[in-house]
Amino acid sequence: MTAHRTLVLLAHPDLEGSRVNARLADAVRDLEGVTVHDLAAAYPDGRIDVAREQQLLLEHDTVVWQFPWHWYSVPGILKSWMDQVLTWGFAYGTDGTKLRGKTLQVVTSTGGPEEAYADGGYNRFTMEQLMRPLDATAHLCGMPMAEPMVLHGVRTMSDAELDRQALQYRALLTIDRARAA
């Protein structure tokens, strides 16, 4: 039996300028069986190597989409990756069963506080409601979607809290691997 493998698709348009997503990625980069794949660094011109990306998906059991929450959705590089990689016949549709049974884990960060993402809050909707398109995408691909990890209020998050969240992220990926064993 092969060891459980986790692919972290890191989708940040400016990782060098990121305090939160860079710290989260660094927290899991050294975990055995975890591959951190920085999409913006791999494809600075936006031209995605679909065959390479599909092969990476085939080689892993859990797929993590890690990104800052942008305009109520994923950053452009991840949306482009989804459009090009999750194709008919591979991820869904006739013979599109290659991702079936793999778990999708969303890890995202928001600038606004948690209360801004509530019914009637500043952003009008809960994160659960706003993430429905991601859940629908996972469902179409036959991937159960794990409970998302959402870090709220990252613009004002203390370094100590960020360290705590990074440890929680590390534990989440470690637990996922232990659960699969």
Image: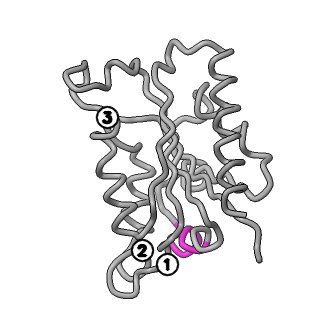
Image-based side of 111 in relation to 25, left or right: left
Residue 32 sits in which quadrant? bottom right
Residue at image point 31% right, 34% down = 71
- Left or right: where 65 falls relative to 27: left
Report the colour scheme: one colour
Between circles 3 and 1, the one closer to the viewer is 1
Please name the residue that numbered disc 3 is placed on.
71
Q: What is the crowding at mark 1: few (fewer than 14 residues within 10 Å), some, or many (at least 20)?
A: some
| Mark 3 → mark 2, Cα distance in angstroms | 26 Å
The residue beneath circle 2 is 91
Q: Nearer the viewer, residue 66 or 169?
A: 169
Question: At numbered mark 2, what does the secondary structure look like: helix, strand or loop?
Answer: loop
Q: Nearer the viewer, residue 45 or 84?
A: 84
Residue at which label 1 appears: 98
Where's residue 103, x and y in %? Answer: 52, 61
Is residue 72 toward the left or the right of residue 113 in the image?
left
Label 3's element?
loop
In percent of width and height, residue 30 lies at 80, 46
Q: Earlier in the sequence, mark 3 or mark 2?
A: 3
